[in-house]
Amino acid sequence: MSTYRERIRQALGGKVQFVQGDDACAYGAILAGCTFFAGYPITPATEVAERMSEILPLLGGCYIQMEDEIASLGAIIGASWTGAKVMTATSGPGFSLMQENLGYGIMTETPCVIINVQRSGPSTGQPTLAAYGDMMQARWGTHGDHEIIMLCPSNVQEALDLTIVAFNLAERYRTPVLLFIDGELGHMRERLVIPEDGEFELVDRVRAERRAGYKPFEAGESLVPAFAPFGSGYRTYVTGLTHNEQGLPRTSSAPIHDQLVRRLSDKITTHSDDIVRYEAYHTDDCEIAIVAYGLTARTCRDVVDEGRRRGIKVGMLRLITIWPFPETLVADLAKRVDAMLVPEMNLGQIVHPIREAVEGRCRVKLLAKIGGDLHSPHELLEALEELRCQPR
Amino acid sequence: MSTTLTLKTAAQLRATYLRGEMLPSIFCDGCGLGNVLNYTLWALEQLGTDLDRTVFVSGIGCSSRLSGYVNADGMHTTHGRALSFASGIKAANPDLTVIVFTGDGDGVGIGGNHFLHAIRRNMDLTVILVNNFTYGMTGGQAAPTTPVGSFSTTTPYGNIEHPLDICELAKAIGAPYIARWPVSYPYQPIKSIAQGISKRGFSLIEMLVPCHTAYGRRNGLKDLEVIWQWYRDHVVLLDDYDHITQFGSPEEQAALREKIKIGVFQDVERECFDERWAALVERVKL
């Protein structure tokens, strides 16, 4: 009888494959130990659900197609409370529908992963084309004060690797984690190497150990409470209302609300060193830094090489963790460069926290592009030339 | 299950099943929600259900607060979405008993889509839906169940929309167990809730509960005695309904139009989601 990990390898197939970004997200989830997926079909994210529906029953997990995206997120949050690692996948319109339950997931400290294969909006927009228009919705889409974790891969391999990371962060910090790609990356086929166990970290949420004196929302130094799954005899009450450490509603107390909501924020912001991931490319001596993320960053890497050939001292900071925003990282870079170029496949979203971090220490130029086409190397180079020619 | 009921007193129930620190409840004096909770606990008592393996799920509204009073795992979710959370819990761990408390607005207003599909999938859930004809927690607005002509804070000139018959809807979609009882019937709801929990598949027990505070006072039913009498006068047992339809006088038949059918609407066997999923896994698993 083969072990569960061996059966995962068997279910995923060959070690080297030529697959889409959506497939890679599904594979990453399975490798991370996801046993429950609920979703609703939507272009360009449907293939994530298709792969999960193929693979999960092979491993004794559960796939369920819900009636909408609201129910999908509700179902995975419910499933997570039985102790399962869970995921859903969607695109912009579906992500809009998920906002209320996303807040519920944050408030109830429920580990779960949400993939958003972005398309352009507003509304139904361009279903099959790439966009990064949901970056700020990810941050502030659900109502109320909160922090969120969001990762942004640039290629198919990274979609798999970062989906595993997303699960680990969700488990470690007991919170929903967002992984955002786009319609282009979701549907693009690339070489994918499925990593061996041992080549990646696997994190499980910290479990409650003693029933006596257990308070389901009492957190120690880590700021993350220990978890007791439904059915384990701990008799936990979970509510989206402001609650005390026992989990019981206390909706009229300012101190309890303040303490709870600040802890939920602090458990993410105080661990930003663990959460923030980035790639610095030729930033040591650069005068102009491209700050990019997602698919756009791939073109930018070539543009950095070409810019240097043309004598422009250019580098790139690729943001992999978008939220919590790596403010110190960007602020430090701003001290060392003359200008930042921020190419975005939206009308300017991440440029705002960048400007906030820069605080006027260098020029920040947005290169916004929408409609589905990627930034061309030419237009990026042109923008670099312009920045070089402008006086400080 | 024994055929005779030996009921614990309310004080005994409270000590055995409820979270003391949650009491007193938020419910208005004279509200029937406490009775619904008692009926549920008596049913669990009859069945000997293990509360360590039972999860109470609810949405938003007065009835959805019931989950918090039971000393068991509980999930008080978002408005209308209880069934989606409950479906996730049950699908991920079919060994758990999952009981849903919801209301008419929560369950078939904002949550109507989930209601439809949880029944279609035949999720093994016991849904205790408390119908009070109104949105009580927000102060008495019109609901999908508000009778035509009734007054509410959002139908100040009378409700023009037709109310939904929740049990008939559930029957049309194929729920294997469906019952409706007014809260003034003390025995039948206990039996139905117990049957619902025992049933493999989706069980709906609709409880007609008067809300004299938010609904009654705008409709000449502010007084408790009066509103409870209204319920006695406006219900008809399914068997009587059928008999009158066949053999009743024209007057009796005309009177039926003003009445709400009560009783057990459906009690059949139908394979549920987790059984079918388990069979699928057995067929394809590595």
Image (spheres, rainbow, N blue to C red):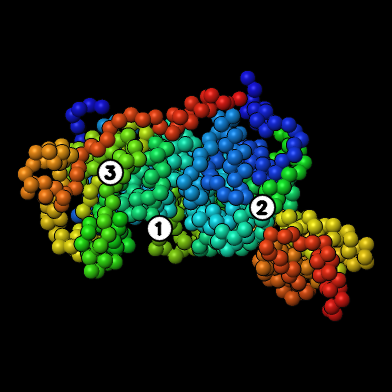
Label 3 sits on a secondary structure element that is helix
- Subunit ID for the residue under disc 1: A
Q: Nearer the viewer, mark 1 or mark 2?
A: 2
Distance of mark 1 from mark 2, alpha carbons?
43 Å
Label 2 sits on a secondary structure element that is helix
Distance of mark 1 from mark 3, alpha carbons?
38 Å
Q: Position of residue B14 (x, y in %)?
A: 27, 43
Q: Residue lying farthest bottom?
A: A391
- Subunit ID for the residue under disc 2: A
Q: Amino acid at mark 3?
A: Glu
Mark 3 is surrounded, within 10 Å at the Cα level, by few (under 14), some (14 to 19) or many (20 or more) other residues, namely: some
User: Looking at the figure, which quarter contains the N terminus of chain A?
Assistant: top right
Q: Amino acid at mark 2?
A: Gly
Q: Which residue is mark 3?
A: B168
Q: Position of residue B148 (x, y in %)?
A: 22, 59
Q: Residue at x 15, y 55 (%)?
A: B227
Asked whether residue A366 is in view, the answer is yes
Q: Residue at x 35, y 54 (%)?
A: B109
Label 1 sits on a secondary structure element that is loop
Which of the labelled discs sits on residue A183, or is there none?
2
Mark 2 is surrounded, within 10 Å at the Cα level, by few (under 14), some (14 to 19) or many (20 or more) other residues, namely: many
Q: Residue at x 64, y 27 (%)?
A: A7
Q: Nearer the viewer, mark 1 or mark 3?
A: 3
Residues at circles 1 and 3 in contact by the CB criterion of under 8 Å:
no
Distance of mark 2 from mark 3, alpha carbons?
43 Å
